[in-house]
Amino acid sequence: MKNKPSLHVTQTNDGLSVTLQGNWVKETVKALDLAFNALTCNPKTVYTFDLSGIREFDTHGIMLILHYTKKLEIQNCIVLKVGASESLEKLFTVCEQHYPEKKEKPPKEIFILSFLENVGKDIFEGYRTLSYFFAFTGELTQHVITSLLNPLTIRFKATLYHIEQSGARALPIILLTSFLIGIVIAYQGATQLEKFGANIFIVEMVTISAVRELAPLLTAIVVAGRSASAYTAQIGVMKITDEVDAMSSMGFSPWNFLVLPRLFALMISLPLLVFFGDIVSVFGGMVIATTQLDVSFVEFIDRIKETVALKHLIIGLVKAPIFGCVIATIGCFRGFQIDSSTESVGKYTTISVVNAIFWVIAIDAIISVLLTEMGL
Amino acid sequence: MKNYIAIEAKNIVTQFGQSVIHDEVSFKIQRGEIFGLLGGSGSGKTTLLREMIMLQKTSGGQMLVLGTDVMKISSKMAQKLRQKWGVLFQFGALFTSLTILENVMIGMREYTNLPDWIIEESALMKLSMVGLPPKVANMYPSELSGGMKKRAALARALALDPKLLFLDEPTSGLDPQSARTFDELIVTLRDTLGITVVMVTHDKDTMANVLDRFIILGNKKVLFEGNMELLKQTRDDELKKFLS
């Protein structure tokens, strides 16, 4: 077969003649590399490369020739090229001009040094993020105050939009999780209470734990998962496409247009969601109480009126806007941290959800301890 | 070679819902030609380009790329065809998680059995060919300017020595001098490698200096097909806009 690439070396009067034949393309380069490698180099000889037999070629084939030409030249050999067709000559010249003389190597990594470097970077990064976060919350507080003093600057339409997106649309999943949580508490409690014959205490158990702790916490966690991620991704992508800069340059403050509507939306909608969650989780408990412990709906509700103080409900509802504030702040803050790469969208969205859920739980714990110490 | 036609569009119809973008658009692109797709904004230039590279489906008609109908192609054949072309997107579309060098090498890594050193050296060569200094090789796309990203993306498109090169507004966003260098580079590549180049462009200088032939799209049809000389003789006001 004529197209079969090959390399022939013949001794001539002036030195060595190397005949190149066939297709010098990327598919054949691997085999040719081996052939070239076998070419022994005698220093200070004249090599004549006969390129007239080359049928098809591409940059990879030419690169191979160039590579070995340079290698020979280093050893003081003289390399001549003859017989190249016009187009080969042309491409050859282009490739020769751009042949990488020395490779830019990424600096070698020494484990202990790079480890220390990474630790240092992480600590510094953490410190910087923290100071950014303080600056962010400071500025946020300032904007919240100014916009509350001038309520007309609040973007009501945007706020309503986010109430719908983050609040109303979250209702089905929150109702479902709250109902299931009500069932779980009641069911676990029922088996224990039945042993003591203290069936009626299911009421306090379910109601207090649900309205005071579990419904607010679960609602906040679900909203953190839905909305913190959404806010981060939305703001981040707007940053990547320069929409945020466009806004600032047109004199629209990103605070008023992006952050405050989201913050207000969550602070308004979370207590409402929690209230629905309360109702449904208590209802879930009632269902189990009736079926498992023979406590009827009427008895259950009467007992709630008698023994469960209103403060539990209020404490649960007061916590909700605090959670909403935490979720929105973290979601927006992480969104503004996203830079120009698409990878950072994923990175910061993940961080945002994890942070939001963590801080919701942490703040819930702090409030729980504080209120108990205060005797509430 | 018996087939001198690189791409043939036969009565292409494109429709998005109710709005018709192309109504029976036909043209032929010869091998070794630098062919331009021109037209006002919204005339469907980029859509036509995307249809050629199988990113978008046509609503009717036939699109023959290197002799195969891309609408009726098996996925195996499509994969083979994709290796025969390089595409430069308008904003580069480099993979942000890879360095510039890795971006250029990835095609060779996946589709050839070349030894690593050859892959690396030819990637570096391609970068130098498009006019990038060697130090960018280990940088990430986010560290480069728009024009540099575009060059790097061209290097990626050229990595596998494609037969066909699709360019979406290659010179937009480049300074005039780099734009001309870019033009020269494309001509050199065509002259040496025999690449067929299809580009969407607005650049008047590119039109005059680089394009062998072009079509002008408008009113859902091909308004004009030919070269600069022919266009200069036109009396159509609509077409004269492309000359000024």
Image (cartoon, rainbow, N blue to C red):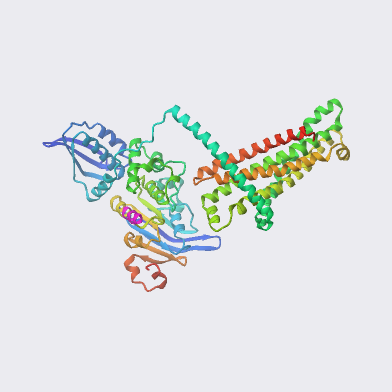
Query: Quadrant of residue A307 in the image?
Result: top right
- In the image, residue A169 lies at what x, y percent? 68, 49
Q: Is residue A137 above or below residue A11?
A: below
Q: Is residue B99 visible?
A: yes
Q: Does the magenta stretch include residue B180?
A: yes
Does residue A230 appear in the picture of this structure? Answer: no
Q: Spot the residue most to the left.
A: A13
Q: Position of residue B1 (x, y in %)?
A: 30, 52
Q: x, y percentage for residue A140?
A: 62, 48
The answer to which quarter of the image holds residue A308 is top right
Residue A251 drawn in magenta: no
The answer to whether residue A152 is left or right of residue B120 is right
Q: In this view, does A315 lie above or below A163?
A: above
**Residue range of the region highlighted in magenta in the rendering:** B177-185
**Quadrant location, the N terminus of chain A:** top left
Q: Which of A74 and A192 is in front in this view?
A: A74
Q: Residue at x 25, y 40 (%)?
A: A65
Q: Nearer the viewer, residue A137 or A216?
A: A137
